[in-house]
Amino acid sequence: MGTSHIIAQIDEEISRLQQVKDLLIGSTAKHGPGRPAAPASNNRQLSPEARARIAAAQKARWARARKAGEIAAVVDNTKCWRQYPLLESQITV
């Protein structure tokens, strides 16, 4: 075995180790801390009936919020008699 043959084997080993190193560095670079990425294709779809149920529920929530807001506005308006005692007889709740 000549020295050139030994050097060729060392070069082959170095190139294999470089490839392994690149693979290891590449695999750790892809995975950072935290949650893994979501799958590319999300096949979960809502049916039209489910969308209608969700829309109806949201409209009911908005209606309750509007009603609560109207009641709060009436209550806030009735507090003005503390500032203007003469208007207390005119307040209707």
Image: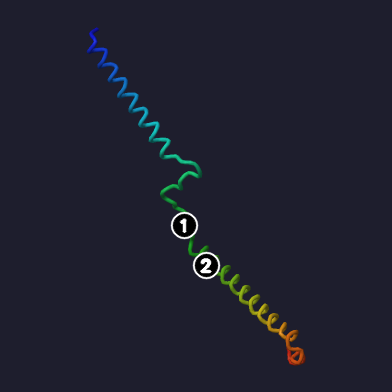
In percent of width and height, residue 71 lies at: 67, 79
Residue type at the position of mark 1: Gln
Location of the C terminus (image quadrant) = bottom right
Examine the rendering and report whether any part of residue 51 can be seen. yes
- For label 1, the crowd category at 10 Å Cα-Cα, with few meaning under 14, some 14 to 19 and many 20 or more, is few
In percent of width and height, residue 74 lies at: 68, 82
Residue drawn at x 63%, y 76% is: 69
Measured along the vertical axis of the image, is residue 89 above or below residue 9?
below
Q: Which mark is residue 52?
A: 2
In percent of width and height, residue 53 lies at: 55, 66
Does residue 60 appear to the left or right of 33 in the view shown? right
Residue drawn at x 69%, y 80% is: 76
Q: Total label count?
A: 2
| N-terminal label among 1 and 2 | 1
Q: Quadrant of residue 75?
A: bottom right
- Disc 1 is placed on an element classified as loop
* Residue that carries the numbered disc 1 in the rendered image: 45
In percent of width and height, residue 54 lies at: 55, 65
Between 64 and 91, the one lying in front of the other is 91
Location of the N terminus (image quadrant) = top left
Does residue 1 appear to the left or right of 44 in the view shown? left
Residue drawn at x 75%, y 84% is: 82
Q: Distance from label 1 to label 2 (Cα)?
A: 13 Å
